Amino acid sequence: MFGNLRKRLSKRNSNPLNDSSWSGAGTQQIAAKPAGSRTTGLAPPQDNGPFSSSPATRRPNNPSMNPFNSPREAPPAYTPGPAQSTEPSHVVSASSDSDPYAFLKSFDTVFLIDDSGSMAGRSWRETGKAIETITPICTQRDADGIDVYFLNHPDSTLYKNITSAGTVVEIFQSVRPSGSTPTGQRLNKILKPYLQRYEKNPETTKPINIIVITDGEPSDDVESPIIQAAKKLDKLDAPAWQVGIQFFQVGREPGAREHLKQLDDGLRELAGVEELRDIVDTVPFTGDGNAELTAQGIMKVVLGSVNRRLDRNSKELHRKA
């Protein structure tokens, strides 16, 4: 009898569902475990109610999708440094005694950029490349900064007296080409107040060098404001270099080169007079693909509309500066 009783007790004690020592130990172990600690595969599962059968949430393996691994860093701030990185290696420093662009210190440089619809695409890219190449030369040599205008984009005081080539590039990149090509109207808006200022204060008004970057023929009358400006300068007996307008053609617009060439060589004929000062020069950008302006090309762009006068009167010009 005692043998049978002993067998029954032995079976009851070996049943894990009735083992009070296991339950107590398990409860103590879980209660003592700090929150968030990991368990091994040998530990008893913790009862989490209705969600006990749900698998643990998996973190994504892609670092860009994982909020625990992705750093929340702000994008790098803009630094006005392109003036150094965009300047071609063959350009001489403004402080050099042999600086071929030194006379630009005596001029106010103005950029008039064609942002009409036809400029979209290749012409706009070529314009950006030209600006990156040319503007460092001008900003380094114009103490009170250069001015930037667009044919359609509204004017801004932020576009005046710019001393950093990087700022010019940043402004250009914020504009999108659209609209017509009112070159004559915009030139007149620059020339008219300048000539009024020169007439009042000829001794203190610096010469102006206007660089027009365009891809084609204007949609308005560009000849009239140029002819009127040339006549006004002749009437005031202004120095030959007082105003220069350089047309720099980008793109491959049909007929554009012929029209600009007529402004360069046929202004007297268009004006119907025998004597009229030459204030216009044109130069095309003929590079293909990734071609860049050569040193000679850069010189032509920034000096073309005034260098003929400077060659004859460079000493007098530097005296006035």
Image: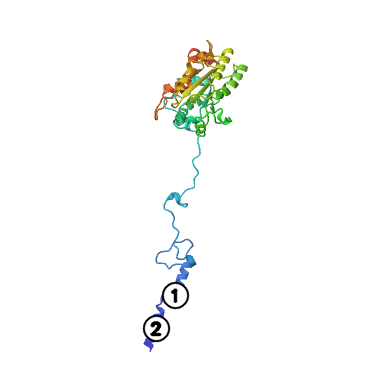
Name the secondary structure under disc 1. Answer: helix
Tell me the kind of residue under disc 2.
Arg
Callouts 2 and 1 close, C-beta under 8 Å: no
Residue 316, x across and y down, in percent: 53, 13
Crowding at mark 1 (Cα within 10 Å: few <14, some 14-19, many 20+): few
Q: Quadrant of the image for the N terminus?
A: bottom left
Residue 175, x across and y down, in percent: 52, 33
Name the secondary structure under disc 2. Answer: helix
Give me the residue at 58% from left, 24% from top.
Answer: 189
Farthest-out residue, left = 3
Along the line of sight, the residue nearer the viewer: 215 or 279: 215
Q: How far apart are marks 2 and 1 (CA)?
A: 19 Å
Query: In front: mark 2 or mark 1?
Result: 2
Residue 8: which numbered mark, if any? 2
Residue 3, x across and y down, in percent: 37, 87
Along the line of sight, the residue nearer the viewer: 311 or 173: 173
Give me the residue at 52% from left, 19% from top.
Answer: 244
Task: Compare marks 2 and 1 and give the one earlier in the sequence.
Answer: 2
Residue 298, x across and y down, in percent: 44, 23
Residue 228 visible in the snapshot: yes
Tell me the kind of residue under disc 1.
Ser
Residue indicated by mark 1: 21
Residue 101 visible in the snapshot: no
In the rendered view, how is the structure colored? rainbow
